[in-house]
């Protein structure tokens, strides 16, 4: 017995000594990437093409994750993994070349530890499709609202070492763009690789970025991938943004690359990025010939190497749900949701298009989510000039018709246009302005208001009602979604008059509160309380004005903040009585207007100074007069504003303007709007034949923002001779 005890003691001491000398296990936070590094013992002329590796990660519970690995330059290979459960994960690497002992059979263990970061992805895990097939949720089941921004070809053409935003010294265009979208509540970054480098986007030659290929289509430049692309995706993941990722674009990519080269790249990109918070969109616009079969094949390659089963789709051309391509995609095992593209120019999809996808069922009989991922980018030419408002109309209509969110796009950013120099690629054709002019367009703020509202009311409980007369008497420009229990209804009115209609299917036993929600400012207007819906119906009051409005009727508590008074943008005075003078002093604000920041051979040229120089012969001139222009006047401190006068240039005719006030530069109040308040605020100057905007203002603000919209005469120039702001 004593001998046995001595033997057991010695055994324990030996084990403890071995553990003390062993290398500690890597500690990897949950949902964070970790690279397993292995090294080849054999030389390959082209390792990218001559060998493949993959690894199986097995949790102590028995759960497994199978992932492709990738060549990372020299003799180094990696398998990128993100743990989905706490505890120990054992892994083993396998190689297509079984004789390569450096790669075949390599293994080890990592220890997954709690994640102490604060983003929703860190707290809740990767995004997946909900169990009922209707929406996206985080891994823990929390609803996920898709608010995306489009930056096609960003890996290839967006700079991570330079930034030409006027006055900026951040030296990273990519982070500048992402940070702006994060502040506005965007949750998805939608992009694809220009894999064949044949798409022709951006401004080729104006802002050259390194190629992704060391040998064109045959071997990637691993340094570019490591230093640029991985760093971009690391930043997105760190900030809690989902990456909607594709590998190319319709036939332009598939015709430039051989099938073998495209398949190998699909495997490589899947290997590098499956451990990130990705949602696969395969490629842009695959539903055509001859590209369809090639992209479907790559989608299968991705599915086989993505052990996380991230949601997977394929970005389609504008097509309806009964299209043969849709039916074929719907039957494929890898296909999990529909990525739509419905609306170019000022066209907004009818409710029937979305109803077709809402009613579609997968092979298992469950619904499939859909997301409107490309509709009416702001201020671009595509099927005509899109302008400003169609983006907002498309977004609200799509979401209330069942879309799981919306992907916004805007001139310059989606097209990766660097500056005003040259007309190459998409600059001068589809896009009218560079990225820094597009970044602060009003639509990006309005998308954030959409997302805030949907999260506040519980978007996941809303069911689109389309043209069902049991729920409303709405026509095409009036959209309704309501909860199954009748506790809430959300209506969107984008008609040009004040008419609304009746909401039905409510619970007559409940008491409701009503609000108007302004999609231009993100503010609520109380519209009634203690409301009873007799016979389950309620007649919505007239809209506050002829702009588009959202109406909320709810018996539940909702955080209806911030609020505003019922707006009155109109000028009650007769046209001949437009104010000619204002109390207070003429101000000299700090002016910011990126629409006139033009890069030429002499450097950055700007005509902002002409706005307040007191000389009507000098004019502020926007770079793209057909696009929406934003002029921000910073008074440096909060002041009581009393009036604004805009003397337009000699060539300008019939412009529309909106005036907004803000204390903090974010929370905006509309003070005047010629679209909804009428043109009585404009007059003709008898001396110079100029149009003059003149409006008395009231309130204490630091910032006054002037939006100048496309004129009624389309491409007529919009120039301004003087902008006079008065305050005391």
Image (spheres, rainbow, N blue to C red):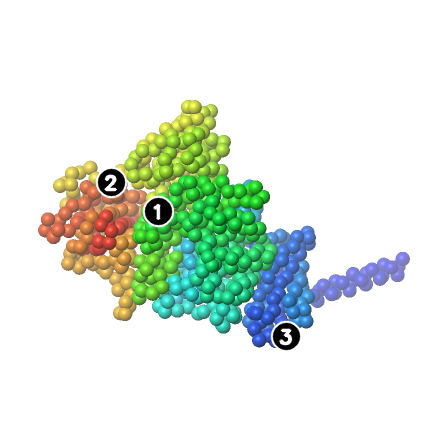
Q: Is residue 641 left or right of residue 6?
A: left
Where is residue 48? Give x, y as percent: 56, 69
Q: Secondary structure at mark 3?
A: loop
* Image depth: mark 1 or mark 3 in front: 1
Position of the N terminus, as image quadrant, is bottom right
Which of the pair 605/128 is nearer the observer?
128
Badges 2 and 1: C-beta atoms under 8 Å apart?
no
Which of the pair 638/326 is nearer the observer?
326
Q: Quadrant of residue 537?
A: top left
Residue at the image point whose x is 33% and y is 63% from the top: 419
Mark 3 crowdedness (10 Å alpha carbons): few <14, some 14-19, many ≥20: few
- Residue bearing mark 2: 677
Query: Looking at the rendered structure, which numbered label has been put on residue 347?
Result: 1
Relative height, residue 98 to residue 60 (above, below): below
Residue at the image point whose x is 62% and y is 68% from the top: 38
Q: Tell me the distance, in whole angstroms, between the alpha carbons under discs 1 and 3.
A: 58 Å
* Image depth: mark 2 or mark 3 in front: 3
Q: Answer with mark 2 or mark 3, whichever residue precedes in sequence.
A: 3
Which of the pair 630/402 is nearer the observer?
402
Query: Looking at the rendered structure, which numbered label has been put on residue 45?
Result: none
Relative height, residue 255 to residue 518 (above, below): below
Q: Answer with mark 2 or mark 1, whichever residue precedes in sequence.
A: 1
Q: Is residue 644 left or right of residue 242?
A: left
Q: Secondary structure at mark 1?
A: loop
Badges 1 and 3: C-beta atoms under 8 Å apart?
no
Residue at the image point whose x is 17% and y is 48% from the top: 692
Where is residue 707? Give x, y as percent: 27, 50
Q: Tell me the distance, in whole angstroms, between the alpha carbons under discs 2 and 1.
A: 25 Å
Q: Quadrant of residue 591?
A: bottom left
Residue at the image point whose x is 10% and y is 51% from the top: 687
- Residue bearing mark 3: 42
Q: Tell me the distance, in whole angstroms, between the alpha carbons under discs 2 and 3.
A: 75 Å
């Amino acid at each position: 017995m004593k001998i046995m005890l001595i033997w057991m003691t010695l055994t324990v001491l030996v084990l403890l000594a071995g553990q003390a000398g062993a290398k500690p296990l890597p500690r990897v936070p949950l949902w964070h990437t970790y690279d397993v590094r292995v090294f080849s013992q054999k030389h390959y002329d082209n390792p990218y093409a001559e060998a493949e590796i993959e690894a199986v990660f097995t949790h102590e519970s028995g759960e497994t994750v199978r992932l492709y690995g990738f060549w990372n330059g020299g003799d180094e290979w990696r398998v990128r993994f993100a743990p989905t459960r706490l505890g120990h994960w054992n892994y083993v690497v396998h190689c297509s070349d079984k004789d390569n002992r450096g790669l075949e059979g390599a293994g080890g263990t990592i220890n997954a530890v709690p994640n102490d970061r604060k983003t929703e992805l860190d707290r809740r895990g990767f995004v997946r499709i909900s169990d009922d097939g209707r929406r996206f949720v985080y891994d823990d089941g929390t609803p996920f609202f898709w608010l995306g921004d489009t930056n096609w070809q960003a890996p290839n053409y967006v700079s991570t070492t330079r930034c030409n935003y006027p006055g900026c010294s951040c030296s990273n265009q990519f982070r500048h763009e992402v940070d702006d979208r994060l502040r506005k509540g965007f949750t998805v970054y939608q992009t694809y690789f220009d894999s064949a480098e044949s798409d022709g986007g951006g401004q080729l030659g104006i802002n050259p970025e390194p190629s992704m290929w060391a040998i064109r289509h045959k071997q990637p430049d691993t340094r570019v991938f490591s230093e640029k692309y991985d760093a971009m995706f690391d930043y997105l993941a760190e900030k809690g943004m989902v990456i909607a990722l594709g590998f190319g674009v319709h036939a332009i990519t598939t015709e430039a690359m051989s099938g073998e080269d495209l398949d190998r790249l699909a495997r490589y990109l899947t290997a590098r990025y499956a451990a990130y918070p990705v949602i696969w969109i395969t490629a842009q616009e695959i539903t055509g010939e001859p590209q369809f079969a090639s992209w479907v094949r790559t989608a299968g390659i991705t599915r086989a190497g993505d052990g996380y089963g991230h949601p997977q789709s394929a970005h389609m051309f504008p097509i309806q749900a009964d299209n043969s391509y849709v039916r074929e995609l719907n039957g494929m095992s890898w296909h999990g949701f529909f990525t739509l593209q419905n609306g170019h120019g000022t066209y907004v999809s009818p409710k029937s298009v979305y109803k077709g996808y809402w009613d579609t069922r997968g092979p298992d009989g469950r619904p499939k989510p859909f997301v409107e991922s490309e509709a009416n980018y702001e201020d671009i030419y595509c099927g005509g000039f899109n302008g400003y408002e169609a983006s907002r109309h498309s977004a609200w209509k799509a979401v209330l018709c069942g879309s799981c969110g919306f992907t916004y796009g805007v001139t310059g950013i989606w097209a990766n246009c660097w500056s005003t120099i040259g007309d190459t690629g998409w600059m001068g054709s589809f896009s009218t302005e560079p990225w820094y002019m597009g970044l602060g367009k009003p639509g990006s703020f309005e998308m954030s208001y959409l997302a805030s509202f949907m999260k506040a009311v519980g978007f996941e409980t809303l069911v689109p009602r389309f043209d069902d007369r049991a729920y409303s008497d709405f026509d095409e420009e009036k959209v309704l979604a309501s909860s199954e229990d009748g506790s809430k209804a959300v209506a969107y009115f984008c008609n040009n008059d004040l008419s609304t209609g009746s909401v039905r299917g409510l619970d007559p036993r409940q008491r409701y509160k009503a609000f108007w929600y302004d999609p231009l400012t993100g503010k609520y207007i109380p519209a009634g309380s203690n409301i009873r819906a007799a016979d389950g119906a309620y007649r919505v009051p007239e809209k506050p004005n002829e702009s588009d409005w959202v109406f909320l009727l709810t018996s539940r508590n909702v955080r209806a903040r911030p609020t505003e008074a019922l707006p009155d943008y109109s000028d009650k005075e007769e046209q001949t009585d437009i104010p000619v003078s204002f109390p207070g002093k003429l101000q000299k604000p700090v002016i910011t207007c990126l629409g006139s920041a033009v890069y030429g051979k002499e450097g950055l040229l700007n005509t902002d100074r002409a706005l307040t120089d007191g000389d009507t012969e000098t004019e502020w001139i926007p770079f793209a007069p057909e696009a929406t222009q934003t002029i921000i006047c910073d008074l440096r401190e909060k002041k009581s504003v009393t009036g604004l006068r805009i003397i337009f240039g000699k060539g300008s005719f019939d412009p529309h303007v909106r005036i907004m006030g803000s204390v903090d530069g974010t929370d905006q109040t509309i003070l005047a709007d010629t679209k909804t308040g009428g043109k009585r605020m404009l007059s003709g100057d008898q001396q110079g034949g100029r149009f003059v905007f003149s409006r008395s203002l009231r309130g204490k603000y630091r910032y006054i923002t002037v939006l100048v919209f496309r004129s009624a005469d389309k491409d007529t120039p919009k120039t301004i001779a003087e902008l006079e702001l008065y305050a005391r």
